[in-house]
Amino acid sequence: MDRQGGCGCGAVRYETVGEPKFVAHCHCASCRRYTGAAFSTWVGFTDDQVNWINKPARVESSPGVGRSFCPNCGTPLSYQGAKWPGETHLTIGSFDDASGLLPKGEAFPDEALPWVRSTLGSA
């Protein structure tokens, strides 16, 4: 299924083609810091499944890791890392309609904040 999304102010837009490789929560401290959330939910695609209609800004957040965001409103949009070459992971909150994107996994659960409980299997 093809989906669209973008930032809060509408300056950056993207579209995806086909089904994602995964939908998962990430509990790592780096994702918490860069998204400002207790955990981040990522929707993973191959690079060729993602088309940026309006390009985001990009920062290298750590060696081998690039994160994109809107240069106008600051919305965090994507993650690309050397650990997962050829993939673009998009923030679930940036999709226009994320209702069909069900998280089925967790990354770095050992780094989860002590009060965060898994939502997997409860939907």
Image (cartoon, rainbow, N blue to C red):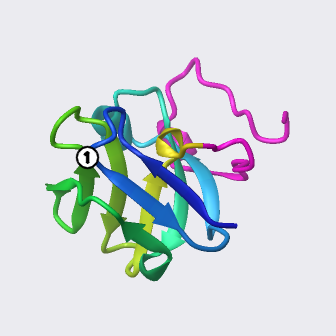
Q: Position of residue 51 (x, y in %)?
A: 40, 70
Q: Is residue 33 above or below residue 3?
A: above
Q: Secondary structure at mark 1?
A: strand
Looking at the figure, which quarter contains the C terminus? top right
Q: Residues within 10 Å of mark 1 (few under 14, many from 20)?
A: many
Residue stretch in magenta: 97-123
* Amino acid at dot 1: Phe
Please tell me in which quadrant of the rendered image residue 50 appears.
Answer: bottom left
State the residue at coordinates (35%, 35%): 35
Q: Position of residue 69 (x, y in %)?
A: 25, 46
Q: Which residue is mark 1?
A: 69
| Residue 11 is inside the magenta segment | no
| Residue farthest toward the top in the current orientation of the protein | 115
Q: From the top left corner, tell me how far across and down residue 30 is, in percent.
A: 31, 43
Q: Position of residue 57 (x, y in %)?
A: 17, 53
Determine whether, in the image, residue 44 is placed left or right of residue 32. right
Residue at the outermost right position? 122
Above or below 22: residue 119: above
Instruction: Identify the image quadrant of residue 80.
Output: bottom left
- Residue at 17 percent of width and 36 percent of height: 72
- Name the image quarter holding the N terminus: bottom right
Would you say the magenta stretch is mainly helix, strand or loop? loop
